[in-house]
Image (cartoon, rainbow, N blue to C red):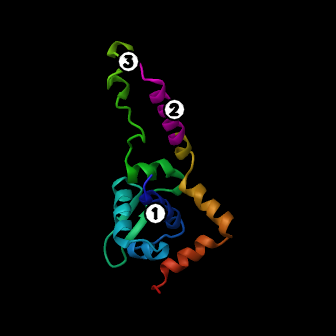
């Protein structure tokens, strides 16, 4: 997965703590990441319908639906696309020892194993919500952590 997935997930978790839109530059400052690159990730989240982009002086980004309805799979697909991590190219049918096409009517064991792995990966990502991650952040970083983040985001800056 790309670095953008990590950044996007962190932003989604942070956005659970606010009601008002948060500018991309403020989110980038919070995470000390490239504002330009983060803006691209936020735009991808907006295209996928996971966040709203609000224009204007008080603009920024807000979650477009309840965090319990946004999964890690949603975020991963918004950033990296829906394509599987492995794509079989039927390499077994190439080269001097190529398997004849008539023996290749079903996926090879490698392709089947990778498909099973992809299915398990998607199931695992689908089972985790942004709301669940926000709860874990609070549990792991101390109660009120996200309230503190929300207050910082709402301040005028450093």
Q: Give the magenta part as a residue range.
A: 105-122
Which one is earlier in the sequence, the residue at label 3 or at label 1?
A: 1
Q: Is residue 128 visible?
A: yes
The location of residue 138, given as percent across then percent down, is 65, 66
Relative placement, left or right, of 152 versus 76 is: right
Q: Secondary structure at mark 1?
A: helix
The location of residue 90, given as percent across then percent down, is 35, 27
Q: Which residue is drawn at the image coordinates 34% and 15% (left, top)?
A: 100
Q: Which mark is residue 25?
A: none
In this rendering, the answer to whether 134 lies above or below 119 is below
Q: Which residue is mark 3?
A: 104
The location of residue 22, given as percent across then percent down, is 43, 72
Q: Which residue is mark 2?
A: 116
Q: Which residue is mark 1?
A: 7
- For the residues labelled 1 and 2, the Cα–Cα distance comes to 27 Å
Q: Secondary structure at mark 2?
A: helix
- For the residues labelled 3 and 1, the Cα–Cα distance comes to 41 Å
* In this view, the mark in front (3 or 1): 3
Q: Which residue is drawn at the image coordinates 59% and 70% (left, top)?
A: 146
Dot 1, crowdedness within 10 Å: few (<14), some or many (≥20)?
A: some
């Amino acid at each position: 997965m790309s670095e953008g997935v990590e950044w996007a997930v962190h932003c989604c978790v942070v956005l659970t703590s606010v009601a008002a839109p948060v500018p991309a530059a403020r989110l980038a400052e919070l995470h000390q990441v490239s504002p330009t690159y983060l803006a691209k990730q936020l735009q991808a989240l907006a295209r996928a319908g996971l966040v709203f982009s609000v224009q204007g002086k008080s603009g920024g980004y807000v979650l477009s639906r309840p965090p319990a309805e946004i999964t890690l799979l949603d975020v991963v697909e918004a950033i990296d696309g829906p394509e599987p991590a492995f794509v079989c190219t039927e390499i077994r049918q190439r080269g001097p020892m190529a398997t004849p096409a008539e023996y290749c009517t079903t996926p090879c064991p490698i392709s089947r194993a990778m498909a099973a792995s992809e299915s398990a990966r998607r199931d695992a990502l689908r089972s985790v919500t942004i709301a669940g991650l926000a709860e874990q952040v609070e549990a792991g970083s101390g109660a009120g952590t996200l309230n503190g983040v929300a207050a910082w985001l709402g301040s005028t800056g450093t």
